[in-house]
Amino acid sequence: MEQLTQEQLTESAVGNANLFSPLTLRSLTLRNRIVVSPMCQYSCEDGVANDWHLVHLGSRAVGGAAVVMAEASAVEALGRISPQDMGIWAEKHAEAFAPITRFIKSQGAIPGIQLAHAGRKASTQRPWDGGKPIKPGEAGFWPIVGPSALPFDEGYQAPHELSKAEIAEIVEAFKQATLRSLRAGFELIELHGAHGYLMHEFLSPLSNHRTDEYGGSLENRCRFALEITQAVREVWPQELPLVVRISASDWVEGGWEIAQSVELCKKLKELGVDAIDCSSGGNSPAQQIKLGPGYQVSFAEQVRREVEIMTIAVGLIYDAEQANQIISEGHADMVALAREFLRDPYWPLHAARILGHDIKWPDQYLRAKR
């Protein structure tokens, strides 16, 4: 694979890159460094995308983002966070995505999808219904799985501890979901290894108490994530980029932390991963996160520097100057926004005006450019 060169790594630091510089990921050229972060919409029936998703994702492509990422899409039905989550476990899901990816590409953006499995955090209500675990006998309840039979928190199900055969089945589910994503027209895949979902659960000693080859040592705890990555990279075209989202820290003493993240990312790079999306937390109710603007950017900078791989910075990134500084000072190669894109689908167009960049607007909107 094409590795990140030292020239690329130092480009930002010497002032040659900014928020609106193009960026090459394998065969793709991003028109800027702005990514629409995967944002669960909890609006599907049986995992199938619909008109809401066409408008939600399509408007962000019209708004000038370089990559528009579809929300966490479960590789099997049991891997959904809520009954209304997006899915990619059947052909009907790929077919529903096709007009959405086609529209995103028509607007000059790259359509991406986040492949996910919720693990022990599955079978919960959607946020506006309370977000609580669904109880046995209630609609939307299903048995959940994890690396160990440890519930996420009080009131949550104790997950079924996955056997090695069941682990292999989930790895295969990620592989098949990758093939469906390709048929659906996606050009970038992100594997969800963050926020306390299944891949992260295997990585963290807080949620993984196994004594076999999938637990114990760092090497063993990384095995599941690496097997998924290898299976996906084998069938995902070499000319298309693969990204992994990690929680760089559990924010809990004795949990997963940045030094372990660096070691994982070195192995991911060897398997053909092109960029690391650096988030944090989500695996323990005991987490102690010090929130503030850009509070996770240091994780992206450290992974970028120590692994020599491209990174995406996320977390309370609000304004244009802040986002531009992250790129121009070499802390990360891309920024991914979530809540700010919910407030303003056209954030890149407005950011370009603030920063003095003359970027292309949709022809239909040109009368509002000046």
Image (cartoon, helix red, strand yellow):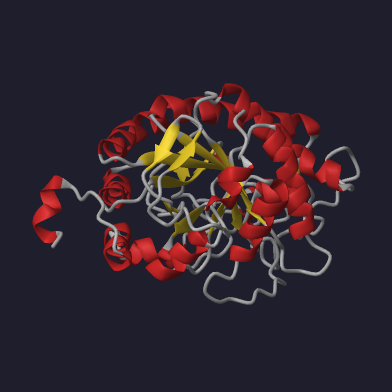
Q: Residue at the far left: name it.
A: 367
Q: Residue 73 in the image: x percent, y percent?
A: 49, 42
* Residue found at x 66% / y 34%: 229
**Closest to the observer: 129 or 216?**
216
Q: How many marks?
A: 0
Can residue 117 be spotted in the picture? no
Q: Residue sitting at 53 percent across and 29 percent down? A: 178
The residue shown at (64%, 32%) is: 272
- Residue 287 in the image: x percent, y percent? 70, 71
The residue at 44%/40% (across/down) is 112
Relative to 34, 240 lies left or right: right
Image position of 357 with respect to 21: above or below:
below
Picture quadrant of residue 108: top left
* Image position of 343 with respect to 150: above or below: below
Q: Residue furthest front?
A: 14
Image spot of residue 49 (x, y percent): 36, 41
In-image side of 365 versus 293 (left or right) = left
- The quadrant of the image that shows the C terminus is bottom left
The answer to whether one can see residue 337 in this image is yes
Rendering coords of residue 318 (x, y %): 42, 70
From the viewer's perspective, is residue 92 above or below residue 352? Answer: above
* Camera-nearest residue between 231 and 4: 4
Q: Nearer the viewer, residue 240 or 199?
A: 240
Q: Quadrant of residue 6?
A: top right
Quadrant containing the N terminus in the rendered view: top right
Give the left or right position of residue 337, taking residue 362 as reference.
right
